[in-house]
Amino acid sequence: MEKFDIPISKPDLSKQDFLEIKKCFDSTWISSKSPWVEKFEKSFAKKISGTKYSVGVNSGTSALFLALKSLGIGVGDEIILPTLTMIATINAITWVGATPVLVDSTSQNDWNIDPKKIKEKITNKTKAILPVHLYGYPCDMDEINKIAKEHKLYVIGDVAEAMGTLYKNKSVGNCNDISCYSLYSNKIITTGNGGMVCTNDQNIYHLIKKLSFFDFNETTHFKHNLIGYNLVLSGLQAALGYSQAKRFKKYINKRIQVFSWYKENFKNEQVKLIISAKENSPNYWFPAVLFKDKNTKKRIVDYLSKNRVETRDFFLPIHLQPVYKNFFKKQKYPISEYFFERGLLLPSYFKITKNQVKFICNLILKKIK
Ligand SMILES: Cc1ncc(COP(=O)(O)O)c(C=O)c1O
């Protein structure tokens, strides 16, 4: 039996998806060499990232790892990232042997990395800025790209959660040198597990293609010039992604609608929803709410859970993670902690109904008093 009547997230898997996977299955082209991989990469670039190129990989974390590798980033290089992010962002940096440098969130109204504080952390070892467009809200890309240009740094976008997000009318995946998406099952479209690396640079594209699959060579198959990896997306996964991408616009519109339902219910109440700058359009992946303190939040999480509604905490900031905290001893990032203590993600998915959202909001409003 399911633990929750209303889970935090649920993939929308349709009959068309199944038929596309079956077509791929019947063709026997099920590996990464399948034509479905190329079809999915092309449709992703056109409909979602807005970039010239995209490479399908087996996770968003692999996408970040390959982005760093393709830029030659390694031991001795420093990479600037926000402390308020999912563990994968820093793990990819650690995997390539580079040094992560943390930055706090912007303000109590903006959980994303603060461009002003980025400037303070730049040294002669800094190679890249890695902004994370958290919970689908875009970072201040004009400022970040300006700083990067001034200091000759790369910008690698962690857009794992920001599929469909627009920064000033432009796909946020087209605002970085390389952008890394996740296709995990809680994302707006999914391949089960998976990711996409996107860029407009042809050389980076070719290098990532090679690195992602052992640097196999078209002509001299078993002669390798690079230490490659095996981080590819399979044909079966790509068939699912290709089919899902056809409904992308519908999925985004539903997330925007669900957010508007939450907003309507929380009007004039003690639940704070972060509103994005007017010129931007977040994908509203999950509605994120903030309570007045951590005890209020705990009370509400328990009450929702008792009523079979699932929620998710905000990420534990990196400087507080057991695995990394010794590395960042005595460093303080109070705004990220503000969000961690008070922030909560509420359910959103394609089939959630207006009544279910009302039910969740009523439980919260009842318990908050
Ligand atoms: C901000 C962020 N970065 C990276 C990832 C890693 O993606 P994946 O789980 O596909 O490896 C995630 C996962 O959802 C994420 O939320």
Image (cartoon, grey):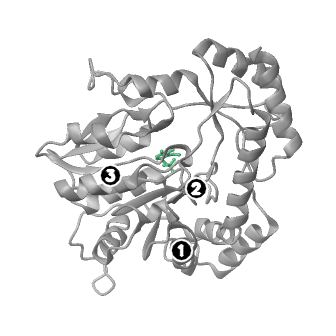
Q: Does the rendering let one see residue 196?
A: no
Tell which circle, 1 or 2, labels the residue nearer the N-terminal end: 1
Q: Residues within 10 Å of mark 3 (few under 14, many from 20)?
A: many
Q: Residues within 10 Å of mark 1 (few under 14, many from 20)?
A: many
Mark 2 in CB contact with mark 3 (< 8 angstroms):
no
Marker disc for residue 144: 3
Q: Is residue 171 above or below residue 310?
A: below
Q: Does the rendering let one see residue 51?
A: yes
Relative depth, front residue between 205 and 230:
205
Label 1 vs label 2: CA separation? 29 Å
User: Where is residue 102, by image quadrant?
Assistant: top left
Mark 2, secondary structure of its residue: loop
Marker disc for residue 37: 1
The x and y percentages for residue 36 are 58, 77
Amino acid under label 1? Val
Q: Is residue 360 above or below residue 118?
A: above
Query: Is residue 69 shown left or right of residue 293?
Result: left
Q: Is residue 357 above or below residue 21?
A: above
Q: Residue furthest right?
A: 355
Where, quadrant-wise, is the C terminus in this rendering?
top right
